[in-house]
Amino acid sequence: MTSDPNVARLRTLRKRSGLSQKELAHILGFRSGAPVSRHERIDTVPDLLTACAYEVIFRVPISKLFPELYQTVEVGIEERLAKMEDELHQSTVKGRGAVPVACKLEFLCDRKNPESNIIAS
């Protein structure tokens, strides 16, 4: 049995729910409990639809169900966004071309402000 809390998270939620791996697999649309077992051990990463299904079932955000995956994605995205922002700040676009650059810079600035609502619900 592993002591890694990240590995145990999905398994713990399933066990608290009283569901077997086979029952959870059936709810997810799988024929056997093997995919659930692999996800619990983090042997495989669930596809997006399955990850969303876990979120719906357990009412826990994907970022909390699979934190190491989320952190890996987050680091890569933040690095690329920072590079994009640097490039946009160095841009010498003028006239009509400056509008999309300003829009992107505003978006990037708004992302840094947690109070900001980038996309209206």
Image (tube, rainbow, N blue to C red):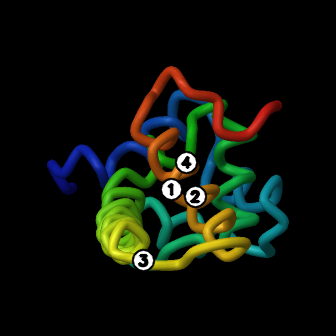
Q: Position of residue 55 (x, y in %)?
A: 66, 43
Mark 1 residue crowding within 10 angstroms, few (<14) / some (14–19) / many (20+): some
Q: Is residue 20 above or below residue 60?
A: below
Q: Name the residue that disc number 3 marks.
A: 91
Amino acid bearing label 3: Ser
Q: Dots 3 and 2: beta carbons under 8 Å?
A: no
Q: Position of residue 98 (x, y in %)?
A: 61, 68
Instruction: Compute the Cα span from label 1 to label 3.
Output: 11 Å
Amino acid bearing label 2: Ala
Residue placed furthest toward the left: 3
In depth, the one of 14 and 48 nearer the eye is: 48
Q: Dots 2 and 1: beta carbons under 8 Å?
A: yes
Q: The residue tagged with tag 1: helix, strand or loop?
A: helix
Instruction: Compute the Cα span from label 2 to label 4.
Output: 6 Å
Quadrant containing the N terminus in the rendered view? bottom left
Q: Name the residue that disc number 2 marks.
A: 102
- Decide which of tag 3 and tag 2 comes sooner along the chain: 3
Q: Is residue 5 left or right of residue 61?
A: left
Q: Is residue 41 visible?
A: no
Q: Name the residue that disc number 1 marks.
A: 105
Q: Position of residue 84 (x, y in %)?
A: 41, 73
Q: Is residue 38 above or below residue 1?
A: below
